[in-house]
Amino acid sequence: MAFFELRGVSKSYGSGSQRTSVLADINLEIREGELLAVVGFSGSGKTTLISLMAGLIEPDAGHVLLDGAEIDGPGPDRGVVFQNYSLLPWLTVHGNVLLAIRHVHAGRPRQEQSELADHYIDMVGLMPARDKYPRALSGGMRQRVSVARGLATDPRVMLLDEPLSALDALTRATLQDEIEQIWRRDRKTAVLITNDVDEAILLADRIVPLRPGPGATLGPSFEVALDRPRDRTAINHDPTYKKIRAQVTQYLMLVGRSHRRAGRRSAPALPDLRPLDLGPPRSRVVR
Amino acid sequence: MSNKVRVIRGLDMVGLGLLVPFVKLATGEAPRTQAREILQSVGLPVLAIGAFLLAWSLLASSVETSIGSVPGPIAVATEAGNLVADHRAERAKEAAFYERMETLKLKYAEEGKPWKDRRYSGKPTYFDQILTSLKTVFAGFVLASLIAVPLGILCGLSDRFYAALNPLIQVFKPVSPLAWLPIVMILVSALYTSADPMFEKSFISSAVTVALCSLWPTLVNTALGVASVDPDHMNVARVLKLSQMERVFKIVLPSALPLIFTGLRLSLGVGWMVLIAAEMLAQNPGLGKFVWDMFQNGSSQTLAQIMVAVFTIGLIGFALDRMMSFVQSLVSFDVAPAKA
C-alpha cells in the first residue's frame, strides 16, 4: 500500500457554464521516503494539486489518503512550503519558525521550543538573521525561513509548491543544493512541484509530468536512477541524466504541442503577416 | 546602525521628517542637496505663512464690527501673552491661598479648634481649560475605541454580522455631534444620579458625544483590516491547525493592526473636532466653553481671544495627529519598527 496516495481525484472551479475542470482523475502513489517531483507547464493546475494534497481545498471526487487514512483538512502532518513564502511580516525569523513549533510541541517548555526553533533556523543556515523581520531578507532567505518553518512541525510529508520559481538563477541553484542536502539527512517523504525539468532531475527520485489542463491528468512516471549526492556540474555529463532529461522534455513538448493543437480549433484565426524585408524603415533613413 | 541613521529614522517616525536635511547637513552629507531640500521643506512653508499673516493684517484692519475692529496677528499674539500672564497670576494666587491655609491650619491646631480642608475655588485659566479638553477627548476616544475595535473585529470576521450592522453604521455615521448632544445630556442627567459624582455631568455628556461621533472610522477600518487578511496567512494558520482564538490573536489582529491604528488616528481627529462643539453646548469647562464664554461676553478682546483658541485647537489637533502617527509607525510592520 502506498504511503501517500491520490485516488481518482478531480477538481473543478466555478459553476454552470462557467465551470472548468482543473484536474481530472488524478491517480498517484507516493512511497515512504520518496522525493517525487511533479513537473508541468504554468497554469496546468500544479498549485491546485498541492492544495488538494495539503487539504487546503477538497476534491470534487476521489480520495487523498495518508497511510491508508483519508486526510481531514489541512494539518501539520503535511508541511507546506508556499510559492510566495507566506511568512508573517510582524514576526522575526525566529518568531515565524516558533509559531509552527508552538503548535506541534505544545507540551514542551518555552526554552526548549525556542531552542528547537533555533535548530531548524540553523539547519537552513539563517542563524545570523535569526532576529530579522522578513522584509529585511532577500527572496532566497525568505524561502529558507519558509522551509525551516515547514520542517519545524516535523511533518510526515513535505509539500513544496514551486518553492524556487520566484528566485534568480544563482540563488535557485544554491537552494536546490541545500534542499537536497536537508532532504538527504532524514529522507522525509516529499512532493516537489516545479516547472523546471533540471531541478526535478537534480532533486527527485521520480518525476511525474502533469499534462496541461483544463482537465489535467498525470503522465507516466520517470524514475531518476541517479546516485546521491548529485553534483550539479558532474551530472551534466552523466548519460543517465541526459537520457531522463531527453525523455521528460520530449514528453512535455509532445503533450504541450497536442494540447496547443487541440486548443487552436477554438482560437480566432490570426492573419498571416510577414515583413517584406528586415531593413530599417524607409522613412527613417536620412539622406 | 550609525547614530545618524537612528536619528533620521526617529525623526521620520515622529513626523518631523523636515528636520532630516538639517541632520544630514550637520554631518556634511551632500550640502547642496540638503540646502535645496531645506529651501523646499522649510523655506516654502515659511513663505506661505508670511503671506498669510500679511494678508490677514491687511484685511483685518479694514473690517469694523460691533465690538471693534478685527484683530490682526499682533493683537492676537498679545492676547495669547495675556492669557499666559493670567494663568501665571492665577497660579500665584492659588499658591498664596494654600500657604495661608497652612499657617491657619497650624494656628487652629495650636488653639485646639477643629480644622476642615478647603479647596481653592478660583476661575479655571486658559491652560486648565486646555487640560479639561484633552481629558474629555481622551475619555471619549478611549470609550469609542473600546466599543469600535471589538465590534470592528466581529464585523471583519463575520460577513453576516457586518451585513446586519452595516445599515446602522451607515445611518449613524453622518450624524452631527450637535444632534447627539441633547439626547446624551438628557440621558446622562436621567441615568447618572450619584450623590457624590466622580465626574461632572457636562464632562460625561461631552465625552459620550465625542465617542458617538468618533467611533465610526475605527469601526470601519478595523472591519476592513480584519476582513482583508492575506489568504496565504490564513492558509498558514490552517496548515498549523491554529484554533479560532489563536487565529484571531496570532494572525488576524497583527495583520489588521496597521489599519486599526489608521482608524484610531482618524477617530481621534474627528473626536477633537467634535469636542469643541460638544463643550460649547454641554458647558464642559474646556476650550469649547472658553470660545462660547468669550462670544457671550462680547468685550473688545473677544475676537482676539477666540482667535487664540482657534490656533490652540489647530496646533493641539496637529500634535495629536503626529502622536497617533508615531504610535501607528510603532505597531506597523511595513515600516521599520523602533528596534531593528
Image (spheres, coloured by chain):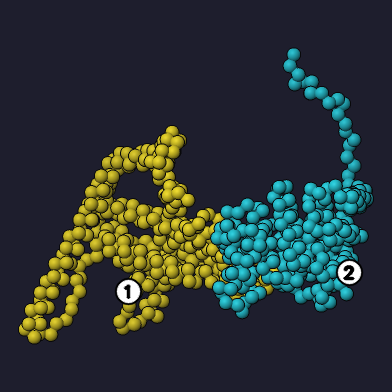
Figure colour of chain B: yellow
Note whether residue B189 is visible: yes
Q: Nearer the viewer, residue B303 or A193?
A: A193
| Mark 1 Cα shell of 10 Å, populated few (<14), some (14-19), many (≥20) | few
* Residue at the extreme left of the image, as rendered: B111
Q: Secondary structure at mark 1?
A: loop
**Is B308 left or right of A86, judged from the image as shown?**
left
Query: Disc 2 sits on a residue from what chain?
Result: A
The residue positioned 10% from the left and 78% from the top of the image is B106
Q: Is A91 on the left or on the right of B318, as rendered?
A: right
Chain on which label 1 sits: B
Q: Is residue B165 visible?
A: no
In the rendered image, which residue does mark 1 sit on?
B200
Q: Are marks 2 and 1 on the same chain?
A: no
Give the mark count: 2
Q: Amino acid at mark 2?
A: Gly
Q: Residue B297 vs residue A247: left or right? A: left
Residue ID at (40%, 61%): B272
From the image, tell me which residue sits under label 2: A8
Residue B18 in the image: state x and y as whole percent: 42, 45
Q: Is residue B205 above or below residue A143?
A: below
Q: Check disc 1 and give the amino acid type.
A: Glu
Q: Colour of chain A?
A: cyan
Checking the image for residue B297, the label placed there is none
Q: Residue at x 84, y 68 (%)?
A: A30
State the residue at coordinates (39%, 66%): B138
Residue closer to the observer: A21 or B126: A21
Question: How many residues crowd mark 2 within 10 Å: few (<14), some (14–19), many (20+)?
Answer: some
Q: Position of residue A50 (x, y in %)?
A: 78, 63
Indicate which label's residue lies in the foreground, 2 or 1: 2
Depth check, front residue: B150 or B304 = B150
Residue A267 percent across, percent down from the top left: 89, 47
